[in-house]
Image (cartoon, rainbow, N blue to C red):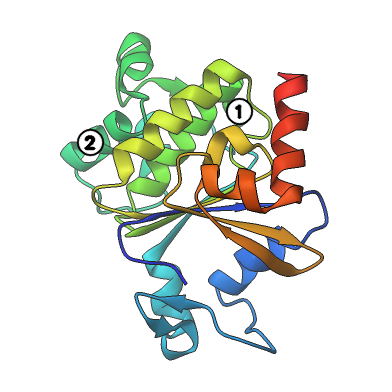
Amino acid sequence: IIKNHSTVGIIGSTGSGKSTIVQLIERFYDPTEGTVELNGKDLKEYSQESLRKSIGMVHQKAILFKGTIRSNLLMANPNASEEEMLAALKTSEAIDFVNDKGGLDAEVEENGRNFSGGQKQRLSIARTLSRNSKIILFDEATSALDNNSQDYIKRTIDNLVSNHTVVIVAHRLSTIMDADIIHVVDNGKVIASGKHNELLKTCNMYKNLYKNESLNS
């Protein structure tokens, strides 16, 4: 169950079923048992077209195209105004480095090679926000980033919460620790749900993931 204007974390080890949950949320297929609910409404009651228009996806690998920052943002919404694009860049914590490079008409080289990994991800988030989607789904969006870049993404998520529903699929606990609710997935099933401090006490798998991450940080 995903509540409006909440932050939902989904955590689990590789192969636990996190990607399947992403596909269910986007209705690439429907569950054979149980339901996925958004705002108290079964996702099956939404058309696939309307649901996908409502959901903005931020993937693990940010892809930028040769052109300008403006042209990259307009790919998500050709009708986006300059004000909307600047607002998206501000929310995604990208506005400062974009201004340093010359603003919306700054050059983007092939594959965005003139930007760092963290900068590319923040531009990717801004492009997603330009669609004006009310649900933002982060699919392992910080797994390839260093800690400094991850901090920018976490601040972006904080910026989004007041006006969006945020779903974060991750294998790094530090990304989802502050979520309103965290679902722990193992072998295709949700085995525990709760806030970070609750899960440390009630879910051994979550506690072990936390210990392993703390030891490796």
Residue furthest left in the image: 83
| Above or below: residue 196 compared with residue 77 | above
**Above or below 29: residue 166:** above
Are there few (<14), some (14-19), or many (20+) residues within 10 Å of tag 1?
Answer: few
Around disc 2, counting alpha carbons within 10 Å, would you say few (fewer than 14), some (14 to 19), or many (20 or more)? Answer: some
Q: Closest to the observer: 156 or 16?
A: 16
Left or right placement of residue 129 versus residue 214 in this view: left
Residue 83 x %, y %: 16, 38
Q: Earlier in the sequence, mark 2 or mark 1?
A: 2
- Helix, strand or loop for disc 1: helix
Residue 87, label in figure = 2
Residue 167 higher or lower than 105, as above or below? below
* Residue 166 on image: x %, y %: 41, 53
**Residue 175 figure quarter:** top right
* Cα gap from disc 2 to disc 1, whole angstroms: 25 Å
Residue 129 in the image, given as x and y percentages of width and height? 35, 47
Say whether residue 114 is visible: no
Residue type of the residue flagged with mark 2: Ala
